[in-house]
Amino acid sequence: MRTQALLLASVAVPLFGAACFLLATLRPRPGWRLTAWVSPACAALSLGAAIALAVVRSGHGPVTALGGLVRADSLSEFMLIVIGAVGLLATAASPAWLNAEIAARRASPRAAAKHSALVQLFLAAMAAAVLTASLGLTWVAIEATTIVTAFLVGQRKTRQAVEAAWKYVMICSTGIALALLGLLVLNAAAAHAGLPAGLDWTRLVAAAPHLNRGVTRIAVALLLIGFGTKAGLAPLHAWLPDAHGQAPAPVSALMSGVLLSVAMYAILRVKVIADLALGTEYTRTLLLILALASLLLAASLLISQRDYKRMLAYSSIEHMGLLALGAAAGSPLAVAAVLLHMLGHGLAKGSLFISAGRVLQLTGTHRIDRVSGLASRAPLLAGCLGLGILALLGFPPFSLFASELGIARAGFASGLGWVTTVALALVLVIAAMLLTHVSRMLLGPAPAATEGGLAAGAAPPQAGTERASTASVIQNGSVATLAPPAIYAAETAKPAAMFPDSGLLPVVVALAACAVLGVYAGPVTTLLHAAAQAVVTP
Amino acid sequence: MSPATPALAAAHSASRFWPGIGAHWGLTWPALAGAGTLALITALFSLAVPRRWRAVVSGAGTALTGLAGAAAGVAAVTGHRSPTLSVPGVLPLSGVTLAVDPLGGWFIAVTGAVAVAVGSYAIGYQGRAASRPSAAVLPLFVASLLAVPAAASAVTLLACWELMALTSLLLVLAEHKRRPEVAVAARWYAIMTHLGLVCVLAGLMLFAAHARGDSFAALARAAPHLSPAVKSTVFVLVLVGFGSKAGLVPLHAWLPRAHPEAPSHVSALMSAAMVNLGLYGLIRVGSGLLGGGSAWWWLLLIALGAVSAVYGILQAAMSTDVKRLLGCSTTENMGLACVGIGAGGLFATTGHPVLAGLALAAALLHVATHAAFKTLLFLAAGSVLHAAGTRDLDALGGLRRGMPATTLAFGWGALAASALPPGTAFVSEWLLVQALIHGLHGASTATAITLPLAVSAVALTAGLAVATFVKAFGTGFLAKPRSAGAAAAHESPGSMLAGMGLAGAACAILALVPGAVLPAIGRAVAAAEVAAASGAGGVVTLRLDGLAGEVSPLLLTVALLIVMVAAAAWLRALPARSARRKARLWDCGGGPLTARMEYTATSFAEPLQRVFDDVLAPETDLDVTHHDEARYLVASAEYRGRVPDRIERRLYEPVLRAVGAWGDAARRLAPGSVHRYLGYGFYAVAGLLIVLAVTR
Amino acid sequence: MNALGVTGGVLQAVIVTGGAPVLTGVMRQVRARLEGRAGQGIRQPWRDLRKLLRKEAITPEGTSELFRLAPLVLLATTFTAAVTVPFVTTASAAGPVADLFAVVALLAMGTATLALAALDTGTAFGGMGASREMTILALVEPTLLVSVFALSVRAGSTNLAAIVAATVHDPVRVISPASLLAAVALGVVTIAETGRIPVDNPATHLELTMVHEAMILEYAGPDLALIELASSMRLVVFLGMLSSLFLPWGIATALTPLALAGGVAAFAAKVTLLGAALAAGEVFMAKIRLFRVPELLAGSFLLALLAVASSYFLTGPNL
Amino acid sequence: MNHTAFVELLNLACGALLVTAVLILWRRQLAAIIRWFTVQGLALTAIAAIIAVDGHDARLGAIAAGVFALRVIALPLLLRRALARAEADGGGRALRETSPLVNVTASLLAAAVLTLLAYAVSRPVVQLTPASPAAHAIPIGLAVALIGFFALVTRRRAMSQLASFLLMDNGITAVGLLTTAGTSLIMELGISLDVLFAAAVLQVLTSRVRDTFGHADLDELRELRD
């Protein structure tokens, strides 16, 4: 009973949060200051619930609730933890971000409340997706995430935002519709194999060997492409850079950090059934094609990338490709590495998107070549960005090193030597390009525009983190307000001054967590292996 | 490793007061653990303490870390056994395995000793300007350097390797706000080091996949049963990976960039300690784990080494940036060491254990000597930069007045580097040449063709090294100052001099009594499974075991000193002497000589540049502007000349261009049209369905 | 290191130091006669030295201790070589020093020090001379070591004493192609290292051509005397090495007065002959341009390499 | 009702499904497209109803009702309102699909090819239950889905792309119905709600696109590119 309560909490808490925010929007003048902190609170609660669930249930079998509609095994619990962790990161960073937006008159308190409500719904939908006991309901939940996030992507009603939202909804719905088709076909096969309706995961796995091969092949292909769309895998990846580029920073963090992983979760589940029904070769081939295509695409488009948020988005495509590669390898080690990679990537990419959001607020431009000398203008921000990128490239002590190494090991060990080598080469190109672009943004002397900034930054060395730099921005903001070009500086000056670092605190914590995980995962490791067992073909 | 001995004694006493340590933990682990803890504590404190104390804390902590590391290394090479540590919890999914054998111990000891000198130097060099990150990362870098040779599984090696890369990258970035070149250099370094990592990773993982286990023990056990194709693939991959770290041509491109732009104490650590680990990897994997393999591996390594040596020293001879010069000379010395390693492997595979031991011993000794004198040189160059504000030899000169101690240090280092007796490198290169020469007996034809060429490469390298360092010392420190900065140069603070002094002392010991370290090298060679022992021994006189050959640098030096003293005394004893008189230099009667009339470094190197015209392909352009009245009257003539890195021109630029073209072409994949995007999916689905319909 | 060697060392010290200027005198005389001049007599170099040693020591302005130390180092290196290389007896005074590489490096050390001293003056002449000398040194090194390689293959060691002993025991080897090629190569090296025509002209003071002279332009008095002495000794050492390596006949193998006397006489005779031949050759040759020198050295390098090759291929792999 | 009649009716409905799909692909008038879409919804309802009646399956009957509510009433209503607003903005002119990326003839041929592909691919599914006449109609559903996807790729107007998406969805639903493998009601409900909401979201976005980009066609939404 207690476990079931915990189980439902991770869906119910965000729903409650959403309700609070919706009420807040109803009030004529929402008291924003206070309500802003509801969402981090909810996220923290659900993360706590997830961890508690994992602790309570460890050692016992899966728990079910709502008459078998909801079930949690180790894999779902791990996914809940991923969602909770990244959700906490994103929501903890959003008050500062939203305040800055409000202060810059780009959003009203009501819009902010609406935004927070949608974010909570988004979190609830993702939690539901990993908790439901049946493939069908997982599909429903994943499609629900698209609907919820559509307005988040298009929140800023600019041309680009609308364009991004349209592409996002159109492409994702199409892809997910393909998954629906596959799902129905699989359902037919299951029915023919004598399964009751409902596409229950465990029943499917149990009956998988009896599924009709021909039908399952079609179903699996469609399911992989369909869920692959949502996971940002080629060929239907194109929504990702646009949506991630246009969505508000915390939302990009959530989408890139967890949404993709949730879709990958569905793929992992489907893979088990497929392997049992068709043997490992079929899914492995499909996944390898998707993986290499995604990696190649990410590498090609990162080379002459000019927009730093799109750059991060393409790097997400790369990492999803790596996950697909690991899934293709399919050994227990590979799957454990894939799961750890989900967590590490979620934390790192979330931090990066939030930092990128700060950069956007500070400089007012998406262009890489218009941002320079960040390290001397905003050392803390630059540090977060730089360390985040290093984490993303898989440098130790960050956990992505351990997971990428695991994936590579598993790849070579399961006879995918050549593919893994090609993937490594592509990853090298991507790493080179990320380093190049980011170092252009971070390094070098501060641009001439902020000469005063440099002075201010240099004057108080001890306290010379964000505060000094924002001081500089105010300075040249206020001097430059008369001059039209630097208007954005005048705008960003105020919020930056009002909220020095609070927006980056979660980022620092998340990166630290990522590093700790990379050195010593402790109990997480056991959970990882248990979760891996859940989706490794026996 | 002079600085290490007290620490070793300390470890001894520790084991006495703390029974059990010495017993089953050996001396190595406590020392290494101490090093790690010290590094972490130092890092935290450097973050915490106010700017005034930062440099002191980080420098002293680094020195102590190095001391502990050196103690561990010395304990290992003096034959103290230590158990293999296995920590499954750390590094998720893989776990960490550590072990220190004499081979690893040798590199650990060298690294630790370098770190001691660098640490005490860093106190003065960082000074008030010490930024929080670089002060905190310095000890961590040293710790990671110490950890790499202690790794006993492929995954652990890779983890330590990447930590080393990360920390060094952060240190290279230290001065990026002052010079834009730093960012460029860091970019090159990061990308090349990542390339190296990918190759090592692929090689080791392939190896581990075939060995069904990634601990070195498992790899070594499986090696004999592997197919030659797999073994060769692994070797070539790790050769590329480790070679890029060792700065072997053509993967050296990062080296002459990163070394000049990094802070000098970091350059010293990178050049004297980090690049060695590339060699360590080659020895460990090539000889130790793969167990020899086929002869062509080693012939290839010899060829690479020879080319790197000659090319590196040529670049050094041409360069006028003193730190770039030192960087290129690092490539040279790594090349020489690779010739030794290659020869060792070659002789081991062709069944000449004595020669194999000798060659590898030469390589290992050269690693140590190079570490000693390159530390000294970089530290001295650093204090020049610190004092005169420039690294350009053409703008230096006359430093001997302002900074006599630094001049002495650089001179001693230059002598050591140019392989002249009683210089440090003389002994190791002598051993190397001995090994090569004796290898001709009963060699196969390929070997018989390779060895003389290798010898001549080594000889040419030695000759050019003399020219290079005469240029560096002569134009940089002697003669007249060529710029205001050089004229105003002042001596560095005591801590920096102390660092240089330690390095200089190490140089002296290795130069005069190299025999003292030969037993340790012998154990290392045995651990590398190349030969039973180093093929040389003796303390005062170095004798080859089983071969005719002996040299005694100590005797040589003593003889020189005696003769000099005698001659000086004789001069004094001459009749009808009056005191020395000062006199004007011969200025051809026209006014006093100015600094502008001196030979610069560029002009000094000009004859060599002409000789090696075809290799270096120097670029010169001359614009002459005439008077409008008469085209025979020259108004002004401007001459510009530079010696670009040829390999970079021929190898890297095309690749970079190709990648750029690829990127621009690929941008057409994302034109922004939703129809195109959906089309990708549609065609993919249709194609897939067709395939499914056709195949059953 | 044995009695024979020590005795030889002492004798060599005396002979080389005392005889080197005489050799220079002889060579100048030979040239003079061949050019139809009367010449100054073979003792002239000694007279010059005495005069220089009597003069007061001069320190050019702005030069450092290194400038003053250089002559001593030069003398010391040359003298040490002169003592340890087996000229008179097959044994060396100090075996561990008589390694061929050690000797070569020792002599190079002297040259390098002189080059530094030249740079120390800061005059254009000094720089020019140093730069040229270093270039030649760098290019000579490969030839030298590879021909040493060729010779050592014969004896299985690079220790001079061992090589000489081996040659004495088996004189036929001298006419093996390997050793002939090596001899020619070493001859060229000797010319380059001792700064004789056609590489350098010891008698010139023309900016465009001088190498060695440009380096020592600022020296005067006793310092100059030391340098002159050292360079003439250097010539003797090189010629002596040639003689001991390729025509070691008459060299003393036993510690008997007769043998020693014979050794001394043979050494003197050989070196004088070689010197005379060198001088005679110089009469018929002109100095070549500095940038043609590499061609000459490349040629000698080729010969040395061929020497190694032949020592391997003509005698078969298993020597 | 006897079996032959059942088969006849079923085939008739399926034929209607396919024909309407082709007509939707053919016509340019958005109003007409919506009309035919409604008809297709009816066909779909018919299929569900026929199978329900034949199998005396109350659950399927309920589903049929749901399909009717969603695809004959809700979605067309939604589309019509969007169209009406669009035409109001456009000054009352009847809104036409500007020439699609692939001209009508070519797209009709493509539709033919896709239908054949659908038949080829879905053979295994058909052979799963060779006895049931419904199963034999599965290729039609797949064909409609593919045609919908094709239209999605080629249609320029936001409105018509939305319609094509719904067409594709109809096809998929048809497959679901024809496999006669029951799915749990809650799943059906979820799926239908998702479709409805997706359509609603897209309809809102359509008006936003119109507000921000005017009557431009979707191919001009190219500000986000590399």
Image (spheres, coloured by chain):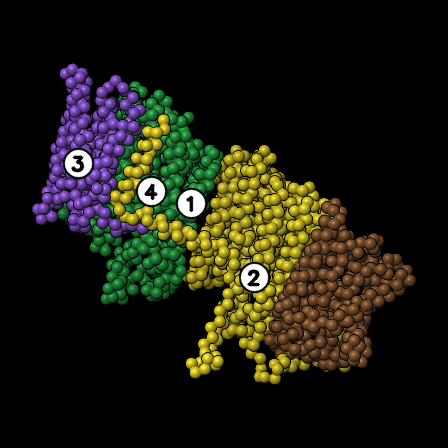
Q: How far is mark 2 from mark 1, CA to CA?
A: 38 Å
- Name the residue type under label 3: Ile
Looking at the rendered structure, the kind of residue marked 1 is: Val
Which mark is nearer the camera, 3 or 4? 3
Q: Chain of mark 2?
A: B
Which label's residue is closer to the chain start, 4 or 1?
4
Can you give x and y, in whole percent of width and height, for residue A107 in the image? Answer: 21, 51
Q: Which mark is residue A427?
A: 1
- Which chain does yellow denote in the image? B
Assign a secondary structure to mark 4.
helix
Q: Identify the element where label 3 is drawn.
A: helix
What colour has chain D? purple
Disc 2 residue crowd, few under 14, some 14–19, many 20+, Cα 10 Å: few
The residue to which callout 4 is attached is: A257
| Cα–Cα span, label 3 and label 2 | 73 Å
Amino acid type, callout 4: Gly
Chain A shown in which color? Answer: green
How far apart are the alpha carbons under marks 3 and 4?
40 Å
User: In the rendered structure, are the residues bearing label 1 and label 3 in contact, judged by CB atoms less than 8 Å apart?
Assistant: no
Decide if residue B27 is in sight here: no
Which of label 4 and label 2 is nearer to you? 2
Quarter of image, res A103 = bottom left
The residue positioned 43% from the left and 63% from the top of the image is: B178
